[in-house]
Image (tube, rainbow, N blue to C red):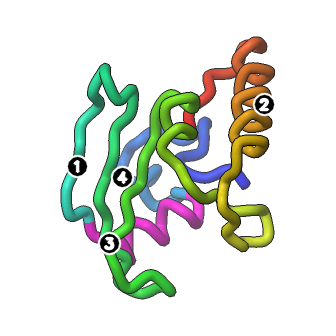
Amino acid sequence: EKVGIPEDVKMSDSGRKTLLPASNYFGKSVTRVATLEFERTRKSMSVLAKFEDSEFSHNVLLVKGAPEMVIKRCNRMMLNDGTEVRLNKGDRERLVKLNNKMAATPLRVLA
């Protein structure tokens, strides 16, 4: 599912009203508690978020960055159906292989 700002929308006042559903959801129901800015050693940035009206009644750390660094620090992943499973060595290897395949094309890959 594509989320965020549609590519053809400029960020004018009218553009802000046409954000996709995920952006609207996060804008209304999530409070930013803290931000860990990008750091070269971590190769990622993180936001500590409080989910107000969802199944999450606690803080959640949202991370984006170099896939190989994010994958190293993860112990679970969410499948397409929403279930969470523990990551094992084989899962990590498959994720790194998939990342390398996408990165070899003109795609910029973030985890």
Mark number, residue 35 = 1
- Image coordinates for residue 26, horizontal then vertical, percent: 43, 67
**Residue at 50% of width from left, 28% of height from top?**
66
**Given the image, on which type of amino acid does mark 3 rest?**
Asn
**Residue 71 percent across, percent down from the top left:** 57, 39
Tell which circle, 4 or 1, labels the residue nearer the N-terminal end: 4
Residue 9 higher or lower than 14, as above or below = above
Q: Residue furthest left?
A: 34
Q: CA distance from mark 3 to mark 2?
A: 30 Å
| Among numbered discs 2 and 1, the one appearing first in the sequence | 1
Q: Quadrant of residue 12?
A: top left
| Residue ID for mark 2 | 98
Tell me if label 2 and label 1 are in contact, CB under 8 Å.
Answer: no
Q: Is residue 105 magenta?
A: no
Amino acid on which disc 2 is placed: Leu
Q: Residues within 10 Å of mark 2 (few under 14, many from 20)?
A: few
- Marks 2 and 1, Cα distance to the nearest angstrom? 29 Å
Look at mark 3 in the image and give the residue it sits on. 59
State the image coordinates of residue 32 (x, y, percent, origin top left): 25, 62
Please, what secondary structure does the residue beneath circle 2 have?
helix
Whichever of callouts 1 and 3 sits on the residue coming sooner in the sequence is: 1
Label 4 sits on residue:
13
Q: Quadrant of the N terminus?
A: bottom right
What are the residue bounds of the magenta stretch?
20-31
Q: Secondary structure at mark 4?
A: helix
- Element class at badge 1: strand
Q: Determine the main secondary structure of the stretch shown in magenta.
A: helix
